[in-house]
Image: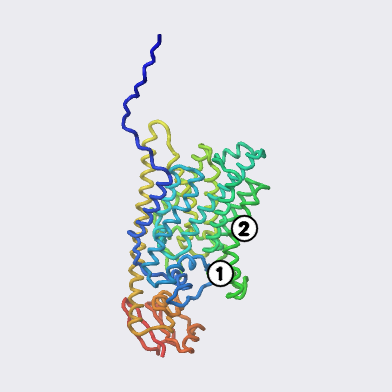
Amino acid sequence: MTVTRPRVPAPAGPRRPSPPRPVALLALVGVLYGVAQLVLVSPRTGIGWDEAVYASQYAAHAPPAPFSAPRARGMPLLVAPVVAVTDSVLALRLYLTAVSSLALVGAFAVWIRVRADRSVPLAALLFAGCWLSLFYGNEAMPNLYVALGGVAATGLLVLTVRAIRESAVRTGRGWDPGARRAWGAAGGADRRRLWGPAAGLAAALAVVSLMRPSDALVLAVPLAVAALVLLRRRALVPLAAVAAGLAVGWGQWLAEAEQAYGGVAARLRGAGQANLTGWTVSLAEHARALDGPSLCRFGVRCGDVSPVALAWWLAIPLMTLLGLWTARRAGGLGPLLLAAVTGAATALPYLFYVGYAAPRFLMPAYALLSLPVARAVTGLRPAGRWRAPVSALLAAGVLAHLALQGAYAYRMAAGTYRDRERMELAAHALREAGVRPPCLVYGQSGVQMGYLIGCDSQGVTQRFARRQPDRVRAAVDRGAQVVIVHTRVPLPPYARAWRPLDLPGRWQARLAP
């Protein structure tokens, strides 16, 4: 007779904690991004020229500043909930810190659905750690949201393609198995799950087109081409989503052109003149601006090329290629290849068509290329004795990136804080001297001072016009108080007889009689 003894389970040893999920890591990156903005870029930094233009459009306390032809309404709409109720720049900064952190998490969360591994939160960390992301995170500028919208749109196109392919497989209309494996497993998508990614794709491109219509158009081209190549006759849904997203921003921009700019052709011509568009090569200018300044124009020199910054810049395409290689070996090349191609496409107009350099123009490229770069860091794991040294080298590279870019962000923010603090003191002195609406501030930082005081404004960069601009003459004729402000720019002849007023920080003012 066989007796079966109960099996006594072996004593359980200490359980190894499971690694954090990518979603939790991404949420942590979003929190760290917001904290880093508050630490490195003071929320008490004064308002900039472009910011004042955008914020004034829907501000309750100040009239709208002149809105030049290239600008779009996305950023004014984003800041409207704050500026419509308060003139506090601090409140605006805190609001934008929260919005940018949430937008970072939301954009890269799309890619966790594409590939749920640690490379996605690492990509978000790499992009959030760039000095541009830190510096512009709490600024009312559109480029960060164009970048994050591009990340989201690219991932959502991948999900839309997967859903359509899965639907075809489930209904018996098969696809080439090799092509399907290249895009990765679909993970149970069906027809009912198609409309979510497609609607998200349209929404992401709508955000980008409201922020910068021209950037949205460039972003849409590789996405549309990818949809046609991969889906052919079944590309109607993603193409319709791309077209719908573009129609939102471009429709508003074109309608406004007819209403306020003398027609579409006139606005396009004015936008081209403002941005110095035409065939050019500005690679050298962008290389000199890698560590600042924020704009190489209007008499501001880019400076010399920093060897350290140049090495960082050149490492990006090398790490991108390495990331694509590791993804190809693992069988998931397609999504990252689309991100790399789209990122490169967004940089081309600013390197070869716009006649000046501003580092923020390349933010969409940096955001999209962070995905294959992160894949290189997490996917390169050689066997044998090289595994530990390579892992240590990659970890050191990530830390060096964060330290270098954080130092650039702190230096740029400190200089900006000082300059804008002096400007705010001058605006406060004008208010103390009795400048009140109805009024117009004309001159250097005139747009910012006008916004702070509540006046109309007209800005200048390198020189005053020799004759009074029409807006200034009209303000004088209707009896508004007109003030000219300047530091280094010589006064125009017609203002030399106006009453002088000394302001703090080397600022000077002239009050019209």
> Residue 3 appears at what percent x and percent y?
38, 13
**Would you call the spot at circle 2 few (<14 residues within 10 Å), some (14-19), or many (20 or more)?**
some
> Residue 382 appears at what percent x and percent y?
43, 34
Work out whether mark 2 precedes mark 1 in sequence or the reverse, and give the earlier one. Answer: 2
Element assignment for label 2: helix
Q: What residue type is labelled 2?
A: Ala
**Would you call the spot at circle 1 few (<14 residues within 10 Å), some (14-19), or many (20 or more)?**
some
> Residue 101 appears at what percent x and percent y?
41, 56
Q: According to the image, label 1 marks what residue?
A: 271
Q: Depth check: 474 or 233 in front?
A: 233
Residue located 39% across and 73% down the image: 87
Q: What residue type is labelled 1?
A: Ala
Element assignment for label 1: helix
Residue located 57% across and 72% down the image: 270
Left or right: 350 as drawn, with respect to 62: right
Q: Distance between the residues labelled 2 and 1?
A: 23 Å
> Residue 240 appears at what percent x and percent y?
63, 55
Q: Which of marks 2 and 1 is in front?
A: 2
Q: In which quarter of the image is the N terminus?
A: top left
Left or right: 354 as drawn, with respect to 170: left
Q: According to the image, label 2 marks what residue?
A: 243
Q: Quadrant of residue 277?
A: bottom right
Q: Is residue 274 above or below residue 136?
A: below
Q: Quadrant of the C terminus?
A: bottom left
Q: Is residue 247 above or below residue 480?
A: above
